[in-house]
Image (cartoon, rainbow, N blue to C red):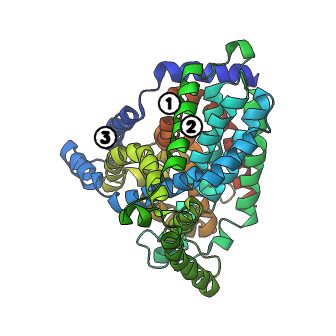
């Protein structure tokens, strides 16, 4: 049954899903039409709201680029690559390959979403070298499917934002006068348990959806051969290189690198000693930056890793202004408030968190940035929670759950992974639709239980 469902959804996505950039443009048109119908704003007012949002995410865009790049660079470290090769060696069958890549991607995405995306992609590339007749798009779908828990994890935008005093987007602090540490969001049992149920069950779901060997879409052997050749040539060049000039010696100096890293380590030791495990986006980015620097050993090695990693951020750079414009329409016209209000109007105390989760999933299709969506929906949801007499902290995390959920059919965050894999969104979205359905069932039940 799961195999037939996978084939069905894959066929639909291959036929109808456009390029991710065009998907964003079409969503802009849809947001414009909905605002025209439901908000009472005229076309020129909507255009003004759109343009007001186009450049509104620049600072957040840079933070997100750094999350992606620092996670990618850590995944490219030689020690990490050797570890991934060893993990890939555990798989003997196509089903085992799918299980391993989905499990590792889920765990790593919970730790840091950029790291999880790239580790999943690199592990998939290692697996296709070692396992015959494995469906390549399904492997990449597993790598992306693990991303479905990112907002329940340590790098989640909403839990890190509400833990940051003075953050302009901390609606809990502004409205409910609360600054909430991650111990009460990310590590709360009602968030932690469903996250790990998804992480541990999803690999087996996708393994059961694998196509039969005769229908598997394997990676072209020529592409695989070229990839291996490039890696071997790069390793050969690195081994043969001998620094001669002063500049080259400084670039390749482990001493320079580790003195600089020592400054970061000292800061983090003092920070955690004073504030405990209190994370925000800048702290998470800093941790992955210095972990990558340490594992790459020399400054120039990290520079080269950044040059590779930054290519995967192209989609963010191009599409964030487009989604910023959609966010401008959603917020500037009040369309986000209208959509959220629909769900509030039919809510009871028992269904409130679940319906906030569903509303966030819908809004995420228009604003796939977790921080951007929280800026658009957060204040509305917190005020609604106060009126309903329910927990604003759980409400904030219900929004986070919805934001991560529909990423499985929203191709924006798949762009770096797809660039690494050489695939299109339509190649994997049939399988990730299964992830959407399965995680949606688990989180909807969790949201009801959370209200009891």
User: 431 or 26, which lies in front?
Assistant: 431
Packing grade of label 2 (10 A; few <14, some 14-19, many >=20) is few
Packing grade of label 3 (10 A; few <14, some 14-19, many >=20) is many
Of labels 2 and 3, earlier in sequence is 3
Query: Among all residues in the image, which is located at the extreme top?
Result: 214
Task: Please identify the quarter of the rendering in which residue 300 is found.
Answer: bottom left
Q: Nearer the viewer, mark 1 or mark 3?
A: 1
User: 59 or 265, which lies in front?
Assistant: 265
User: Which label sits on residue 32?
Assistant: 3
Q: Position of residue 315 (x, y in %)?
A: 40, 42
State the quadrant of the N terminus.
top right
Of labels 1 and 2, earlier in sequence is 2
Q: What's the distance in space between the residues labelled 1 and 2, CA to CA?
A: 20 Å
Q: What's the distance in space between the residues labelled 2 and 3, CA to CA?
A: 51 Å
Look at mark 1 in the image and give the residue it sits on.
422
* Secondary-structure class at tag 3: helix
Q: Nearer the viewer, mark 1 or mark 2?
A: 2
Look at mark 2 in the image and give the residue it sits on.
232
């Amino acid at each position: 049954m799961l195999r037939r469902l996978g084939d069905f959804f894959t066929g639909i996505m291959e036929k109808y899903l456009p390029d991710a950039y065009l998907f964003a443009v079409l969503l802009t048109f849809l947001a414009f039409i909905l605002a025209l119908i439901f908000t009472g704003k005229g076309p020129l007012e909507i255009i003004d709201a759109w343009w007001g949002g186009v450049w509104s995410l620049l600072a957040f865009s840079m933070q997100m680029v750094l999350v992606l790049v620092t996670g990618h660079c850590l995944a490219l470290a030689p020690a990490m690559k050797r570890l991934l090769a060893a993990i890939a060696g555990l798989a003997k069958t196509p089903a085992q390959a799918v299980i391993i890549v989905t499990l590792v991607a889920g765990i790593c995405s919970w730790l840091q979403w950029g790291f999880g995306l790239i580790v999943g992609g690199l592990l998939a590339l290692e697996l296709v070298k070692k396992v015959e007749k494995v469906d390549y798009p399904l492997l990449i779908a597993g790598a992306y499917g693990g991303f479905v828990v990112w907002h329940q994890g340590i790098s989640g935008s909403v839990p890190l934002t509400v833990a940051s005093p003075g953050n302009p987007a901390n609606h809990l602090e502004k409205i409910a006068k609360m600054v909430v540490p991650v111990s009460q969001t990310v590590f709360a049992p009602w968030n932690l348990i469903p996250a790990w149920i998804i992480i541990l069950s999803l690999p087996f779901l996708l393994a059961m959806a694998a196509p039969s060997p005769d229908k598997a879409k394997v990676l072209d052997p020529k592409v695989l051969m070229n990839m291996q050749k490039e890696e071997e040539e790069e390793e050969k060049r690195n081994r043969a290189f001998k620094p001669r000039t002063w500049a080259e010696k400084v670039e390749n100096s482990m001493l320079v690198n580790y003195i600089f890293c020592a400054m970061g380590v000292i800061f983090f030791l003092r920070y955690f000693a004073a504030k405990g495990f209190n994370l925000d986006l800048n702290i998470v980015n800093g941790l992955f930056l210095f972990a990558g620097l340490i594992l790459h050993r020399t400054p120039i090695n990290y520079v080269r890793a950044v040059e590779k990693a930054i290519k995967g951020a192209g989609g963010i750079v191009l599409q964030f202004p487009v989604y910023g414009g959609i966010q401008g329409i959603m917020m500037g016209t009040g369309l986000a408030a209208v959509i959220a209000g629909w769900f509030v109007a039919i809510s009871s105390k028992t269904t409130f968190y679940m319906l906030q989760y569903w509303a966030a999933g819908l809004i995420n299709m228009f604003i796939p940035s977790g921080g951007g969506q929280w800026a658009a929906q957060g204040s509305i949801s917190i005020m609604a929670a106060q009126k309903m007499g329910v927990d604003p902290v759980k409400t904030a995390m219900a929004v986070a759950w919805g934001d991560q959920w529909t990423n499985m059919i929203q191709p924006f965050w798949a762009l770096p992974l797809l660039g690494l894999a050489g695939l299109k969104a339509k190649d994997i979205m049939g399988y990730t639709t299964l992830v959407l359905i399965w995680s949606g069932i688990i989180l909807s039940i969790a949201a009801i239980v959370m209200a009891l």
